[in-house]
Image (cartoon, rainbow, N blue to C red):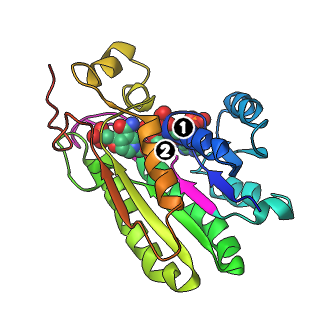
């Protein structure tokens, strides 16, 4: 019987690429995001390969998260894999200068949103005594960089939540994988710089950045490891990257 994966942030970047790799390999999909139109397009593209259903919610909205996941038909509730991927950086600036609304978006989305989705899905995994949760952290969760304190804090929280989940859930047959990517060329920088395309493009200039499919391949590897193996933590940097902010550009 095919597995079911619920992927948050599936409308773009890493989440979308993960949906594509999973579909290629016969994993049924519950794809989530705020942009319904994109979810529909992706579902249309992948539904010749696997069963696909869509859920539209903002991960920051606790009521919506619990209601939407709770509203899944019983057969879709047999979730095997949760990819906690939704998230973004908002702004790049000092604590003195940056916007508190941006802080709220990062803490509420990257941390509390991940927790709300987990709160909705973990009981379903516990009922079945099996499952795999993949949390998308960042190199920013392991190394703090200037002007990124709140984003880095939100991703450091993801690292700790992954550890906490592993301590609580391993005994119930549920694996936890924490994935910490470096610089991946997605819509991430466009969102961070509020639609400023030229600023976003500069982030990926002069080197070969990671692609979303590189991270999706690692996620696919982790969720296909034999039962005796837990891939606990994966850090993936771009080939030209030695630290969060050290990138060797031509
Ligand atoms: P994208 O901006 O391309 O994708 C972000 C995804 O998250 C979108 O599908 C977006 O969907 C969803 N999302 C964001 N906020 C919310 C929200 N409040 N509610 C629901 N969905 C939301 O970026 P990436 O693919 O790069 O980012 C995916 C994850 O990877 C993030 O957690 C990011 O922090 C992390 N990451 C990214 C790195 C990079 O360099 N790109 C490196 C390390 C980690 P929609 O707008 O439709 O809701
Ligand atoms: C995204 C990568 O280095 O901009 O998490 O924080 S970074």
Quarter of the image for the C terminus: give it.
Answer: top left
- Residue 29 highlighted magenta (yes or no): no
Q: Is mark 2 on a helix, strand or loop?
A: helix
Q: Residue most toward the bottom?
A: 171
Is 39 placed above or below 181 here?
Answer: above
Q: Vertically, is 106 above or below 2? A: above
Q: Out of 206 and 21, give the one closest to the viewer.
A: 21
Residue sitting at x 38%, y 67%: 232
Earlier along the polypeptide chain: callout 1 or callout 2? 1
Say if the magenta span includes residue 85: yes
Q: How crowded is mark 2: few (under 14 residues within 10 Å), some or many (20 or more)?
A: many
The stretch of residues the image draws in magenta is 81-104
- The residue lying toward the viewer, choosing from 125 and 1, is 1
The quadrant where residue 72 appears: bottom right
**Residue, disc 1:** 17
Question: Is the CB of mark 1 within 8 Å of ligand 1?
Answer: yes
Q: Name the residue under label 2.
A: 216
Q: Give percent across and percent down for residue 1.
A: 77, 62
| Residue at 41% across, 39% down | 214
| Image side of residue 34 versus residue 209, left or right | right
Residue 249 image offset from top left, x and y in percent: 16, 24
Whether label 1 touches label 2, CB < 8 Å = yes
> In the figure, 52 relative to 130: above or below?
above
């Amino acid at each position: 019987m095919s597995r079911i994966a619920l992927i948050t942030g599936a409308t773009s970047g890493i989440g979308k690429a993960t949906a594509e790799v999973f579909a290629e390999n016969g994993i049924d999909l519950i794809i989530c995001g705020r942009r319904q139109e994109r979810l529909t397009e992706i579902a249309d593209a992948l539904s010749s390969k696997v069963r696909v259903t869509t859920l539209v919610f903002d991960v920051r909205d606790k009521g919506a998260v619990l209601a939407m996941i709770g509203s899944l038909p019983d057969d879709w509730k047999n979730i095997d894999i949760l990819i906690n991927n939704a998230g973004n950086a908002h702004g790049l600036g000092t604590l003195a200068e940056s916007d508190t609304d941006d802080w709220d978006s990062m803490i509420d989305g990257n941390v509390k949103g991940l927790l709300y989705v987990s709160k909705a899905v973990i009981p379903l995994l516990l009922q079945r005594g099996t499952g795999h949760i993949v949390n998308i952290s960042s190199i920013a969760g392991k190394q703090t960089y200037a002007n990124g304190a709140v984003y880095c804090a939100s991703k450091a929280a993801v690292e700790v939540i992954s550890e906490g989940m592993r301590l609580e859930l391993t005994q119930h047959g549920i694996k936890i994988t924490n994935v910490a990517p470096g610089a991946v060329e997605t819509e991430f920088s466009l969102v961070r710089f509020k639609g400023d395309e030229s600023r976003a493009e500069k982030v990926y200039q002069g080197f070969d950045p990671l692609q979303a499919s590189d991270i999706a391949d690692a996620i696919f590897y982790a969720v296909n490891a034999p039962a005796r193996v837990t891939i606990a933590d994966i850090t993936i940097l771009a080939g030209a990257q030695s630290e969060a902010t050290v990138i060797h550009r031509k």
